[in-house]
Amino acid sequence: MKSEAITSEQLYASKSNSASESNFANTLFEMNNEALRTTFSPYVKIQDYIIKAFENVSAMNVFVLAGTFLLMFTGAYMVYELQPEFYAFNSERLNSTIGFSFIVVATALLLFKVSFFVYNLFLYFKYKPIESVSDELLPTVTVIVPAYNEGKLVWQTLKSIAASDFPEAKLQLLAIDDGSKDDTWYWMQEAKKQLGDRLTILQQPKNQGKRHALYRGFNLGTGDVFVTIDSDSIIKTDTLRNLVSPFVTNENCGAVAGNVRVLNNKKAILPKMLNVSFVMSFEFVRSVESMLGTVLCTPGALAAYRKDAVFACLPEWIDQKFMGQPSDIGEDRAMTNMILKQGHHVLFQKNAYVLTDVPEKYQGLYKMFIRWGRSNVRENLMMAKFVFKNFRKESKFGARLLFLNQFLTIAMTIPFLFFMIFFIVTHPILFVSSTLLGILIVSSFPVLFYAKRHNLSEALWAYSYSVLYTFGLFWIAPYSIITAAKKGWLTRELPQKN
């Protein structure tokens, strides 16, 4: 099956590849083999497959991927060689009360997770995105683009929205500069010159945060559906119509999540890893959640909301507090929760693509993850207040199962951190080897999933991402739990990417 996905080259040609991103595959086949190509078609298929699999692979990419596989296979070999040590370690735990209790809890959680995964597979294969409805049936839409220090990229974002295959008479486009310190307002004005009356640009008197910029847009919007798009994101021409079609086919649909991919995945290694992670998070996880009518988070990069559902919770949303402090993060997850609480369905549209910029350096990555982690803790606490009540007429089993999975993950984070520290201190070699083998086994599913949907060479980054997250970002989840009450966007003042 041919992939439906789009690449950053198709939508963002101005982001040129660096000189080091040479075509690794072509160097493998520089010989003239025209005769073989014309006389031995199976060879042609194999060669073309390998070339496609390894296109855009630089020397650094090869080094990182090779290092990842060396680590994982070394870990697997060490597990094999250290079987007596593993047996002694497990025997020691079985003979202690604390160790035995931990094994029982860990086994129960593993069984739950495996069962949950099998159920997810079943739902994933049943999922199908809703096809676009006709122009006549499309609702009126207000697109809101909040921007802070995005520079020229906001111009690209607005141009991609204006190029949408969506009836102009039904589309209102609002761009709101949230007190930027760079030339964002200039590029909004440039977009206004090109788009004329199709675009309305507004400027906040000072930086108040994304939530307040969206609030202003919601109050000025005239459409029956609000679409929010981040100012560092580019959409496909049919994205808007695909995104809002579920509101026509499902009268109880309150919100829709778009399919987020990485825009700058040709520039640096971290975006390559995140691109594979995003495919798993959206095309698999949100497909499953959509089958249960309970997508847990409509992403800021691309989301749509029924106007009536937004205004039913808007006062609570803009004044939301956590532990007495105004909430300045997690506005997308909060809006999703409040719409779910009203009994509405929240769905996912796999055919509504958006490409968004992600951090290219470790500092930006961990700060983004901390913000997401804190929001996840806060909104799971909020969801706990209504998910076991009669909040929806239809079955509530799916919503409760998804909540329980997230709750258990958060609840066990700190205990497993202590166990990990104990394991590292007492048996460092056993810990490293078993962890690397676990990465090899568990990460093979996202690799196969991405390879089937897209291509093999990019899929391999799932292994590198898992190694990075396990050894370099493991602290984020417990830190986010401990500091859940802290305020701050964190990534807003980072140096802008060139």
Image (cartoon, rainbow, N blue to C red):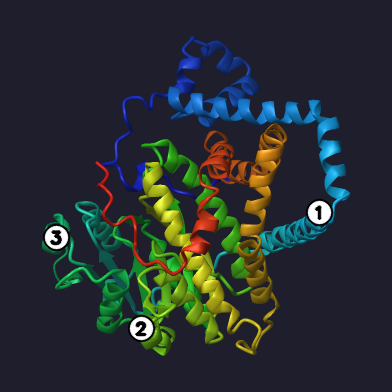
Q: CA distance from mark 2 to mark 1?
A: 44 Å
Residue 35 location, quadrant:
top right
In the rendered structure, which amino acid carries the disc numbered 1? Ile
Badge 1 marks a residue whose secondary structure is: helix
Count residues near mark 2 (Cα–Cα under 10 Å), then give few for <14, some for 14-19, many for 20+.
few
Residue named by callout 3: 194
Image x and y of residue 165, in percent: 34, 63
Count residues near mark 3 (Cα–Cα under 10 Å), then give few for <14, some for 14-19, many for 20+.
few
Residue 430 visible in the snapshot: yes
- Please name which of the two marks, 3 or 1, marks the residue nearer to the observer: 1
Residue 8 location, quadrant:
top left
Q: Residue at x 52, y 45 (%)?
A: 276
- Please name which of the two marks, 3 or 2, marks the residue nearer to the observer: 2
Image x and y of residue 269, in percent: 43, 36
Q: Residue at x 75, y 59 (%)?
A: 109
Residue 439 visible in the snapshot: no
Do the CB atoms of the residues marked 3 and 2 lie less than 8 Å apart?
Answer: no
Badge 2 marks a residue whose secondary structure is: loop
Q: Is residue 29 left or right of residue 402?
A: left
Q: CA distance from mark 3 to mark 2?
A: 36 Å
Residue named by callout 1: 103
Mark positioned earlier in the residue sequence (3 or 1): 1
Count residues near mark 1 (Cα–Cα under 10 Å), then give few for <14, some for 14-19, many for 20+.
some
In the rendered structure, which amino acid carries the disc numbered 3? Gln
Image x and y of residue 386, in percent: 59, 84
Q: Residue at x 26, y 63 (%)?
A: 162
Badge 3 marks a residue whose secondary structure is: helix
As rendered, which of 11 and 480 lies closer to the eye? 480
Do the CB atoms of the residues marked 2 and 1 lie less than 8 Å apart?
Answer: no
Residue named by callout 2: 319
As rendered, which of 127 and 498 lies closer to the eye? 498
